[in-house]
Structures are given as structure tokens and as C-alpha cells.
Image (tube, coloured by chain):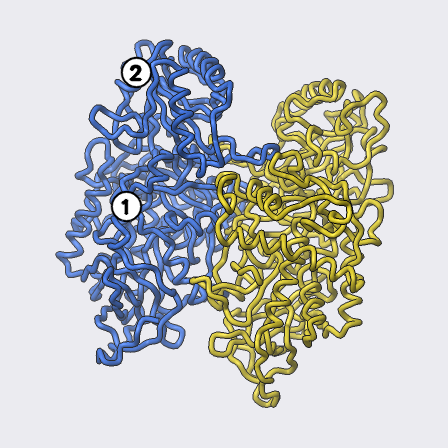
Chain colours: A yellow, B blue
């Protein structure tokens, strides 16, 4: 996607009400995992719907995802007789999202009123929303009954498996769930009459006496388009992963970038800010490790590393030491890169080195889920290869030198190779007995979920570990921390209404997905804990906005069109 | 300060222009370490100035501080022939604030344009600003030539000592610098004709055609007061330490509260947000350890723990283990409480236990700088005492139980006492030789700066450590992480102008201090790196706003006063 395909950002100051070139009951901004469901739900309630997508094609970040969706008390669970009561669901999310405030004796489990209400809304609506999408053929699912929550072993998780759904046509590995989900939702939206307009970058809302009545968008030819919304505008325009200024000045950690759609530049942070919305949760993101070189290149096809493959494989730091359990789930693993060394005033793990041997190269290569062990014929420009560990270190030094200006001059320590040798020896000892005494690799169910394929392990007891070979070739790649997308934006109520500083809804303005504040705080409850709640809120926003009184169509006399700010 | 002394928060939506009950050239909001200098500088430029303070008295957070102010290339350094060139200053702050982006070969050292310009502004104006305050008798200083920067040992710090100034009348320990600074600045403001109005909570700004022309404030009797500003309004109203919702939903860490003035509730986040300001840096705070019990009680007199006293003293976690260098400078030490355990989904260090013996009780007791070793006669309700370590553990268990609902049910592990005994033995071994092999306690200059008094150390080589006694009594207190105040708010330019989403100033609206976004990111450069830059920006905001064209006085017909929204 070249920048010429998308109009440049202009002022987000709201425009005055007046004539529109087109009007609908509901205008949806964004055609990804939040916008398409919102548009479909609105349409099925009988509304005229216009959907505006900034990119030349639909899909957003969701198109790149496996598109698991995490649905508490879903129909498939109920059919299997798996119990998932509301209070059990709330207990788990409270325990994991707000551990410092978690209180089993409190009616809200220590959640604030806002958090509690939002989590109840997820519980209430995720299942009916996904059932409706399924029944309509927009998003037919199969149940991934065995997928565990990310802390399935906690006593507070009464339904440790069973909440995950995925597209029926997703391949066995599920990695193409997003492409399938976007394909069938977009097809259904077109079939059912949603007016989809791509390459429309919404710049601002149109206001009339404190209420949002439409938007102004720009196309790549710089033409301005005023689109009216008789009932409401629902933003689902994604987070701010690709705005370096917002990332640097809001996130609590120095994330390099991420695998969100490149169009996710925080547009709604600015647009909603200009109409008095409260922002919340701007410090947090859905985190994942990312390959440093692809992130620096801003490759649109970059995937986050949702599954770090290989058993005879470790992450080493610049001193050649292991510093983390490489099989932690991605949101947790990413945090290892952001550890702060208060004495040295540096992030010592900002870049780590995934190191593997020929066994993992042969047994664990894959181009799915952001894995870095490239199969034959795949792009392996990120891979450094060495016949010996000394060769490998030389290759890494050369590679790191190219990135000095974006890593604070990170270089390997002089003792890297010697330490790496000792680290491998220690790891191999753990691998032989299947117990990682340093980091507990492979001990939790979620770590097995993302282990990926490994070569045969005769007599093995821990599928995440196997001794690294004593002889080369060895392989390595540079890894850092990034985002899937960010989690901050305007605060909304349980119906997706955007709230002002006194928690009053801004009339006509709704938001769902990563463009609004996530109630999950810093936490990543389970696979699909992004899209399950997003679909639930899309459903609720569609229903609430449907109930808004439609204003009369604005005067459509084109001669009265005001210029864009 | 009871809540009845301060009006309740109302809508921050801007009010329309109209008659004012009083007008001045410049209206300053906040009478603390940012507002008093801003008012003085404005007044000395010949402006009529009204200063509105929310609390019944002036001082804000600064009144509680030592009020060091960090001034690069200050006059006292120059008089001593100590060189502190702009590029050296910029190199240090870039290296420490943005280590992942630091690039010695870049003209901005890897800072963004905004960051670079702001840091240059600090360098340029901190010294003239403080000289002017000194010459006028508002803030007479003495030079604390020996105080090191917080990473004085880094090769990028070309002026490792000499940048700190403090009030001439501050006592030897300097802990009362804030009271003295507020006292003399307030006296000077009154003497020079600043119109000071306390117990005025500013609720919103008044706007006229996109420009800020005044404010509306409420007094405790709920009366509304419209105060006009012919040139500008300068906010200096502090951060959001005492708004639980903002703290919980913006900070990157689960900070419990902090020692900012209780009036610091993020008013300017809401007020500026409603007029289209961009927020920035909302994840970060000036951090410090705080005593858990006083924080939970929201004691207005609580001090952050700027100096953790005692040599025969350690911090232990719930397992009885040391997890941090207890003598780290406060902003860095506080981060230890927020370490995330990704496997257990908890903050294992959220509360740590400062443990000391009779030696430290006798040799290191003090009620200054938030030290927890209470001198005879001082409030020691936070201290748990035990004749043996078992007694001490029993006391801690009892104490912790009172706070279960705010700590996620934190309790001591069963092996606490056994581990604590082993921990003390190991620490004592380190103390005997003066080398902390685990955490490097006492190795850096800044750790000696904050060590406080210790009993005589015959033959000692490391003044931060001494063996803990084999026999009781022992003492302990509960410590967690908190803030001095927060660092996020609207983005401003180098003259303190508040910026909209396209970086254009909002006419007539200025901000300085902790109510606006700090350019320091997560970093704490040195003692006084709060107030030095704040005074510099107060000076620049006063000069820039002085140059604004004064609008004609508004019609003062009181009958036209609009009601407060």
C-alpha cells in the first residue's frame, strides 16, 4: 500500500452541519473486524448503511489475523454441556485484568463500575452476536473446543477451554481465519446492500448542535466527501500502531511498531478528541514479539510472532544469555523486551536473538503465525546463518550494525559467544530432562498451544525443548517487542457510545474495536479476546444506534456544500 | 483538607464569551511550583495577573517537596568555571529519556523535533528564569554543587554535578525547600500585586471564536465566578495523581496513589480535552515508593520515599527474598513494585517489606524525605515490630490482612520467615565486604546521595550496607509504588502554548508543569528535573503570553453573566 493510495491527514476539528453528498441511517468508519460486523448488524436491523474504509480494500488488521474469537458461554459450549456462568467469566477477567484490585468478595470482583458493566456486556452479547453472524452465513464458525484461555490453569478460570470459535473454512492451522472471515463478511455486506466505499479516509465528524450528524472523508484525489448519518456514526477505525508520535508518547513501553494494518494511525484519537471525548487506556496495547527488520521496513505483510516455533531453539540477549521463557504467550513474551535496567538506563532486552539449529530448521519451519524459521523457498532475509557459533555471532554483529540508529546503538557484548555456548549447554541439560529450571518453559497449557511443529522427540517429555546441536549450521534472527494493535482511545459506554468528560454520550457518536478504550487494561485474556469482545460491542452499538431517532435528511443541494474546514 | 473546602467537578465543556466579574491580562490557574513563577514572570512584564488556586492555600505539590531545581548551565556553575554546553545537556537527556532511539550521530541525538525543541528551551531558559527569581528575591537560591545527576556516571553526562539549586533558607538537609520556596514566592507575588484568589476551582475555559478568553471557577459555596483574561490563561494545575479513574486507565503501571497535593485530580486533562488539545505521555509519572498504609488512607501529609534510610535494612518480598537494590533513586526503585509475573498473572512485588534492626532504628531514624524509620515521638503507626523474625512475620501477616481488598489479597508465603532468615544471612555477607553481589547496592553516586544518616561503620567501605543484627527487635513497614505526580497532559510548544491535533496553538491557552505533557518520557534526569524545567517553561509561557495582543475588556455588565453550564 503506497501512501498515494490514501489521502493525507487533515484537521480533525468538526465541520458544521449542512448538505451531504450521500446519507444513510448509519455510517460505519472502517471495514475490518469491528466495522464489518457493525455494518452487518445495522443493516439487518433495517438501516441504510454506508461503510467507509480508508484503505483501497476491506479487511484492516483482522484480514491478517487467524481471527479466533473468544465467546464466553457460546452455543457450542452450551451444546456440549460446558458451563460458563457470568460470574465465573467476570471472576476470570477481573483476576487477570486487574490483579492488584482483584477481590473475590466484592460483587464486581474489584472491577470498577465501568469495567464491570463492559465485561458483563461482553458476556451477554458475544454469543448472540456470533450466532447471528453464523446463522446469516456472514461468519460461519467451527468450535475450537480444546483451545485454552491464556491462564487456563488459574483457579479463577472455571471454563478453561471452549470459548474459542474460528471460521469454518479456516485451514487446520487456522492461520487464514482472518482472510476467510473478511471474505465472507464482506460478501454478505455487499449482498445485503451495505454501501461500501473504499479509499475514503474520514477526517472529521460533522456536528449539529452538539450531535454528530455525519463525517467528512477524503479520497486519494484529495476530493472531499460529506456523508450524512441520520442516526449515528460508528467508528471502527483501529488503533494507533502506525503513528510513531502517538506510539512514542502514549504507550508505556518503547514498542517498535506492529503488525496492525498500516492504516491504523490513531485517526479516532484525534477525531474524537476534537469533539470532547475522554481518552482512556492509552498506555496499553495487544503486544506481540515482532521481527525487528520487517518492523523497521514497515512491511505491510509483517506478522507478529504469535507462535515461536522450534524446540532446539532459544532467545539470547546481547550477552548470550537466556532472559525469558521463549514459549510464553505472545502478549506476555513481548514484555520481556521492555525490561528496564535502572542502573544502566537502558532496555537491555530491546532486541533479542532467536537462535536455532538444523533440527529446528528442518522440523519447525513455517511461514504461519509470524514464525521466523523460514521454510525452503520462503523469504528468509531476516535469517542470519553461521556454520559455527562464532560465525553466527559475526553475522549478528554485522546485522545489528545496520540498525544502530533505531536501537540506541545496540551491539553484542564481547563475551556473547562464550556465554551463548554456556547458555546452550545449560539449556540442553534442561531439555534432556524436560524441565527448564530457569524459566519453566513448556509448563503451562498455553505454551503447548503455540509450540508449533517439532521434529520427532524420541523419549521426550516436554515438546517445547530439545537439545541444540553441538555442531552447525546455526541460525538466528533479530526479535523485538511490538503490537498487534493498540488498546487506547475514547471511553465508551456498554452500547459503544462515546463519552464526554462527565460520562455523558456525545449524541450520534459510537466506537467499537481497537479505536476505543479496551476494558481489558494491560491484559490478554485468551486467543480471540480481541475479536470476541469487538463483535459483542459491534452488536450492541448497532442495536443502540438503531434505536436513535432518525433526523430528517439534510438539504442535499450540492451548491450549499461547505468546503472542508 | 476536607472535600467541602473544594467545589465539586462540573462539566469541562467550554463556556461562551460574555461578561466577567473580574479581568486581568493574564489568568494563572494553580498556585504551586509552576503557577507562582508564571504569575511572577507575567507580573514583572507589566501585566495585571489574577492567580486562581483550587485549594484553600497556595503551594500545591511543591510545598511538600525539597524543591530542588535542576538548571543546566546555571550562573553558579558558570562562576565556578564548570562547563555545561547545550549539546552536552541534550546528549544526556536524549540518552536517558529515549535510550532506544538515542543516536550520538544524529543532530538531535535521536530526539524527535518536538522533544529536541523542548529540551533546548529548557537549556536556554532555566538559568535566566531562576536568576530573575533570585534577583527579585522571590526565590533566592544556594548552589548544591555536589548533587549528582541521577546517571552522573554515564559517559554522556558531561556535567555530572552542579545543576542543582535550592532555596537559601532551606535547612541543611534541604527537606523544607518547598515550604520556603512557596513562602517567598507567594510573598513576592502579593507584594508585587498579583491578585491571588484561593479556593477557586477552575471548571472550564471561556471561548470566543476559537480563542480562550477566560475561565469559569467555582468556590466551595458553589458560586460561579467568570474571570476574563485579556491576553491568555496559563494553567499550572498539576497532574492526575488523585483521580483513581485516570490513574488506573492511563498509567502503564498499577500505582496506588502518590504524594502530590490532593487537588491534583487531572482537571486540565478534561478542560483542555474539551477544547481540542492533544494529550501526550499519559502513561508516565514521576515515580517514587510510598508507604502503603498512608497511601490507602490518602493522607495529605504523605511524603514519597525519596530516601530509603538505613544500612542494616533490606526490602523483602512476600517470599522473604530481596528483589531490588533498595538504594536505587526513587523513580527507578518504584518500578520494582510493578514487575509483572506473566506466568502467575500478578504483580509479585506490588507490596514489599522494608525490614530493619535496632541499629538502623537508632542510627537512621528521620521524618524527612518519606523515610519510614520513625524517630522517637513521631507517628509510627506504619511500623510493625517484632522481637524475633517470627514475631515480625506474624505482625506483617496481620497488617497485610487489613489491606487484602486493595492488594489483590496479598499475603506472606508460608516460607517467608525461613527465606527472610537466609536472605539476611546472604545480605550480611555482602555487607561485611561492602559488595552487594546481587543488586550492586551503593555502587553508583546517586545511591550515596539518598543514603541518609547511618550509625558509625567502623572499617566500613560501603555506607549503604551493614549486617542486620542476629537478634531483635526487628522492624518493618509496607511499601508500594506511587507517584510524586503524573507526567501526562496536553502537548505544548516551546512557549507553553497548548496544541491542537495539527500542532496549532489554541489561541490564549497555555500550560506549564505537571498538568501538561512532559518531554522527559519515562525518565527522571536528576533531582530537581521536575521544577527546573517547570520554571523554565513558566518563564517562556509568561514571555510569550505577554506578547499576545490584549483584547478589549469584555462588557462587565453583571446582568449579562451567563450561568455556569
- Figure check: B66 above or below B546: above
- Asked where in the image residue A131 lies, by quadrant, the reply is bottom right
Q: Position of residue A174 (x, y in %)?
A: 80, 47
Cα distance between the residues tagged 2 and 1: 34 Å
Is residue B409 or residue B166 the one in the foreground?
A: B409
Q: Residue at x 25, y 27 (%)?
A: B366
Q: Residue at x 62, y 77 (%)?
A: A227
Q: Position of residue A270 (x, y in %)?
A: 53, 63
Q: Which residue is mark 2?
A: B358
Q: Chain of mark 1?
A: B
Is residue B419 or residue A424 the one in the foreground?
A: B419
Determine the secondary structure under disc 2.
helix
- Residue A194 located left or right of residue B305: right
- Figure check: A94 above or below A55: above
Is tag 2's residue or tag 1's residue first in the polypeptide sequence? 1
Q: Which mark is residue B62?
A: 1
**Foreground: disc 2 or disc 1:** 2
Is residue A391 or residue B417 the one in the foreground?
A: B417
Q: Residue at x 47, y 25 (%)?
A: B412
Q: Is residue B91 visible?
A: no
Q: Position of residue B259 (x, y in %)?
A: 33, 42
Q: Residue at x 70, y 75 (%)?
A: A46
- Figure check: B208 above or below A348: below
Mark 1 is surrounded, within 10 Å at the Cα level, by few (under 14), some (14 to 19) or many (20 or more) other residues, namely many
Q: Chain of mark 2?
A: B
- Residue A96 located left or right of residue B136: right
Residue furthest out toward the front: A81
Determine the secondary structure under disc 1.
helix
Q: Position of residue A542 (x, y in %)?
A: 64, 67
Q: Which mark is residue A258?
A: none
Q: Is residue A149 visible?
A: yes
Amino acid at each position: 500500500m503506497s501512501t498515494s493510495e490514501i489521502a493525507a491527514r487533515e484537521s480533525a476539528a468538526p465541520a458544521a452541519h449542512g448538505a451531504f453528498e450521500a446519507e444513510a441511517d448509519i455510517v460505519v468508519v472502517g471495514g475490518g473486524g469491528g466495522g464489518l460486523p457493525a455494518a452487518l448488524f445495522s443493516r439487518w436491523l433495517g438501516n441504510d448503511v454506508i461503510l467507509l474504509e480508508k484503505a483501497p480494500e476491506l479487511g484492516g488488521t483482522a484480514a491478517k489475523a487467524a481471527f479466533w474469537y473468544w465467546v464466553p458461554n457460546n452455543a457450542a459450549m452450551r451444546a456440549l454441556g460446558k458451563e460458563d456462568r457470568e460470574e465465573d467469566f467476570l471472576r476470570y477477567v477481573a483476576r487477570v485484568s486487574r490483579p492488584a484490585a482483584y477481590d473475590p468478595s466484592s460483587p464486581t470482583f474489584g472491577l470498577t463500575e465501568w469495567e464491570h458493566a463492559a465485561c458483563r456486556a461482553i458476556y451477554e452479547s458475544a454469543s448472540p452476536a456470533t450466532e447471528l453472524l453464523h446463522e446469516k452465513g456472514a461468519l460461519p464458525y467451527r468450535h475450537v473446543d480444546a483451545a485454552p484461555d491464556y491462564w487456563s490453569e488459574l483457579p479463577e478460570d472455571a471454563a478453561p477451554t471452549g470459548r474459542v470459535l474460528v471460521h469454518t473454512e479456516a485451514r487446520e492451522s487456522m492461520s487464514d481465519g482472518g482472510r476467510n472471515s473478511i471474505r465472507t463478511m464482506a460478501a454478505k455486506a455487499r449482498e445485503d446492500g451495505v454501501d461500501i466505499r473504499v479509499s475514503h479516509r474520514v477526517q472529521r465528524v460533522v456536528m449539529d448542535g452538539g450531535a454528530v450528524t455525519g463525517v467528512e472523508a477524503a479520497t486519494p484525489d484529495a476530493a472531499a466527501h460529506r456523508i450524512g448519518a441520520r442516526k449515528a456514526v460508528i467508528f471502527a477505525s483501529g488503533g494507533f500502531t502506525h503513528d510513531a508520535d502517538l506510539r512514542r508518547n502514549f504507550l508505556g513501553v518503547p514498542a517498535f511498531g506492529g503488525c496492525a494494518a498500516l492504516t491504523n494511525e490513531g485517526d479516532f484519537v484525534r477525531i474524537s478528541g476534537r469533539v470532547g471525548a475522554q481518552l482512556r487506556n492509552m498506555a496499553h496495547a495487544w503486544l506481540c514479539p515482532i521481527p525487528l527488520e520487517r518492523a523497521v521496513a514497515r512491511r505491510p505483510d509483517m506478522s507478529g510472532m504469535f507462535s515461536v516455533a522450534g524446540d532446539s531453539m532459544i532467545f539470547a540477549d546481547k550477552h548470550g544469555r537466556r532472559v525469558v521463557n521463549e514459549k510464553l504467550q505472545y502478549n506476555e513474551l513481548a514484555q520481556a523486551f521492555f525490561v528496564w535496567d535502572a542502573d544502566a538506563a537502558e532496555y537491555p532486552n530491546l532486541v533479542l536473538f532467536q537462535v536455532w539449529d538444523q533440527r529446528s530448521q528442518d522440523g519447525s519451519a513455517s511461514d504461519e503465525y509470524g514464525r521466523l524459521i523460514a521454510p525452503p523457498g520462503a523469504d528468509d532475509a531476516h535469517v542470519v546463518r553461521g556454520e559455527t557459533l562464532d560465525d553466527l555471532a559475526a553475522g549478528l554483529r554485522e546485522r545489528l550494525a545496520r540498525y544502530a540508529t533505531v536501537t540506541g546503538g545496540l551491539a553484542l557484548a564481547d563475551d556473547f559467544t562464550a556465554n551463548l555456548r554456556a547458555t546452550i549447554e545449560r539449556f540442553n541439560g534442561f531439555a534432556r530432562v524436560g524441565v527448564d529450571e530457569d524459566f519453566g518453559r513448556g509448563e503451562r497449557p498455553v505454551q503447548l498451544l503455540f509450540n508449533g511443529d517439532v521434529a520427532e522427540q524420541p523419549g521426550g517429555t516436554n515438546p517445547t525443548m530439545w537439545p541444540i546441536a553441538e555442531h552447525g549450521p546455526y541460525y538466528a534472527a533479530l526479535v523485538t517487542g511490538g503490537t498487534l494493535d493498540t488498546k487506547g482511545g475514547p471511553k465508551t459506554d456498554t452500547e459503544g457510545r462515546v463519552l464526554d468528560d462527565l460520562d455523558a454520550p456525545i449524541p450520534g457518536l459510537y466506537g467499537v474495536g481497537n479505536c476505543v478504550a479496551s476494558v481489558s487494561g494491560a491484559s490478554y485474556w485468551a486467543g480471540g479476546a480481541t475479536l470476541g469482545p469487538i463483535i459483542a460491542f459491534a452488536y450492541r452499538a448497532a442495536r443502540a444506534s438503531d434505536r436513535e431517532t432518525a433526523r430528517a435528511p439534510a438539504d442535499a443541494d450540492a451548491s450549499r456544500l461547505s468546503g472542508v474546514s
